[in-house]
Image (tube, helix red, strand yellow):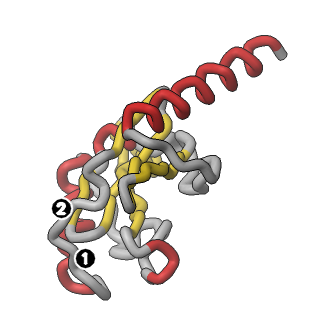
């Protein structure tokens, strides 16, 4: 699987639709998608790849396909955007959450939906993002040194 295109992700009714290039046919990219759910493992669609089983040659069409599948099959609908504080840094997805005036984050690398976040609480969203940025920059330095 190629890199997840977090920068083209779309939040929709409690899900995050994340496109990626599934393959190429005659020099045309074919797109698929993965889903994250606000309710995590409680959702049958959390971290699932293309439950609609339909592919397309454009990102906007694949997002529309995912939305239609969610409209028909979702086990919940949330009109608030739980993924509104999401950032892409060096092809990594960072989602910041606030609960009881404390901040924490989920961190997904470029090629998988395995959350690699440290279990740490922060006093602000900025402090949280600074922590992640420093960690990613430190990891890059270590990888280059090897």
> Which of the two labelled residues, at mark 1 and mark 2, occupies the earlier sequence position?
2
Task: Name above or below for residue 64 compared with residue 13.
Answer: above
**Disc 2 marks which residue?**
64
Instruction: Name the residue at the top extreme.
Output: 145
Q: How far apart are marks 1 and 2 (CA)?
A: 9 Å
Q: Which residue is drawn at 40% across and 64% down?
A: 35
**Disc 1 marks which residue?**
69
Mark 1 element type: helix
In front: 96, or 9? 96
Q: Where is residue 46 in the image (x, y as percent from the top left)?
A: 46, 72
Q: Can residue 1 be seen in this view?
A: no
Instruction: Name the residue at the right extreme.
Output: 146
Near mark 1 (Cα within 10 A), the count class, few <14, some 14-19 or many ≥20, is some
Determine the image quadrant of residue 44.
bottom left
Q: Which residue is drawn at 40% across and 48% down?
A: 96
Q: Where is residue 97 in the image (x, y as percent from the top left)?
A: 39, 54
Q: Is residue 10 left or right of residue 38?
A: left
In front: 85, or 102? 102
Task: Name above or below for residue 16 compared with residue 26.
Answer: below
């Amino acid at each position: 699987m190629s890199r997840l295109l977090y920068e083209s992700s779309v939040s929709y009714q409690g899900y995050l639709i994340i496109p990626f290039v599934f393959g190429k046919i005659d020099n045309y990219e074919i797109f698929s998608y993965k889903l994250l759910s606000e309710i995590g493992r409680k959702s049958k669609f959390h971290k699932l790849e293309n439950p609609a089983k339909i592919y397309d040659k454009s990102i906007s069409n694949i997002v529309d396909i995912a939305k239609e599948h969610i409209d028909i099959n979702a086990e919940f609908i949330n009109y608030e955007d739980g993924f509104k504080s999401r950032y892409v840094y060096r092809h990594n997805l960072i989602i910041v959450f606030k609960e009881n005036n404390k901040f924490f984050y989920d961190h997904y690398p470029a090629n998988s939906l395995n959350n690699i976040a440290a279990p740490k609480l922060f006093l602000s969203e900025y402090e949280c993002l600074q922590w992640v940025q420093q960690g990613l920059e430190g990891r890059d330095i270590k990888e280059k040194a090897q």
